[in-house]
């Protein structure tokens, strides 16, 4: 998907894939059960994905653009910014990725063998102008305190690299 400027010029490319069907790329490893990466079309970025909040990210997966099935299971999936709905603010726009109607395959394990595999879901992508979003990469959103998360969500959410944000 291309993200356009206010003048309708293409500026960014958003690519989303399940790990099992991701095409080979020359630099990004789609390693989540489902993952999205955002890049400038002019390839001038020094980040693997603009969806990262870490200026010194050293791995492709250090982004909330990476969804693991264990993060989508109840009750974890209901947590804003960590579960099924994630918002990214940067470079004058807001990008929201929302997964709904998530169905799990109870006969197969997910990529990490810690829960059922994703079977299907609907993805809604929203892009809106946001002049207050001035960060070069995604701003860190308001996140729940890690110690207040349910035990069932601590390990799945910790895999989001949140330890680096604490």
Image (cartoon, rainbow, N blue to C red):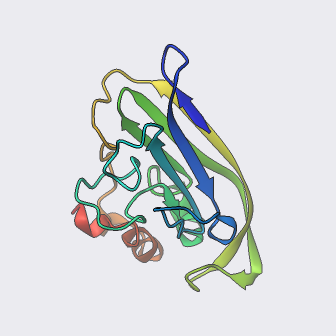
Percent position of residue 69, x then y: 59, 69
In this rendering, the count of numbered labels is 0
Closer to the camera in the image, 134 or 68: 134
Percent position of residue 70, x then y: 56, 72
| The image quarter in which residue 34 lies | bottom right
| The image quarter in which residue 103 lies | bottom right
Q: Residue at x 39, y 24 (%)?
A: 130
Percent position of residue 115, x then y: 61, 80
Closer to the camera in the image, 33 or 19: 19
Figure check: 87 above or below 110 = above
Figure check: 82 above or below 124 = below
60 relative to 29 in the view: left or right: left
Figure check: 143 above or below 108 = above
Q: Residue at x 37, y 26 (%)?
A: 92
Dividing the image into 4 quarters, which one contains the N terminus? top right
Farthest-out residue, top:
7
Q: Residue at x 56, y 54 (%)?
A: 84
8 relative to 159 in the view: left or right: right
Q: Residue at x 50, y 52 (%)?
A: 37
89 relative to 113 in the view: left or right: left
Closer to the camera in the image, 164 or 8: 8
Percent position of residue 39, x then y: 45, 44
Dividing the image into 4 quarters, which one contains the C terminus? bottom left
| The image quarter in which residue 131 lies | top left
């Amino acid at each position: 998907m291309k993200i356009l400027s206010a003048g309708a010029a293409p500026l960014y490319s958003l690519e989303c894939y399940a790990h099992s069907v991701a095409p080979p790329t020359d630099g990004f490893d789609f390693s989540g059960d489902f993952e999205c990466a955002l890049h400038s079309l002019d390839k001038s970025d020094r980040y693997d994905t603009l969806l990262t909040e870490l200026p010194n990210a050293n791995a492709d997966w250090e982004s909330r653009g990476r969804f693991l099935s264990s993060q989508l299971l109840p009750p974890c999936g209901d947590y804003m910014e960590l579960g099924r709905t994630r918002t990214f603010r940067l470079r004058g726009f807001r990008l929201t990725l929302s997964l709904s109607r998530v169905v799990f395959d109870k006969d197969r394990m997910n990529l990490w063998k810690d829960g059922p595999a994703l079977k299907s879901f609907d993805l809604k992508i929203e892009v809106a102008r946001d002049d207050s979003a001035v960060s070069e990469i995604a701003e860190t959103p308001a996140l729940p305190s890690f110690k207040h998360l349910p035990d069932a969500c601590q390990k799945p959410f910790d895999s989001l690299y949140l330890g680096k944000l604490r």
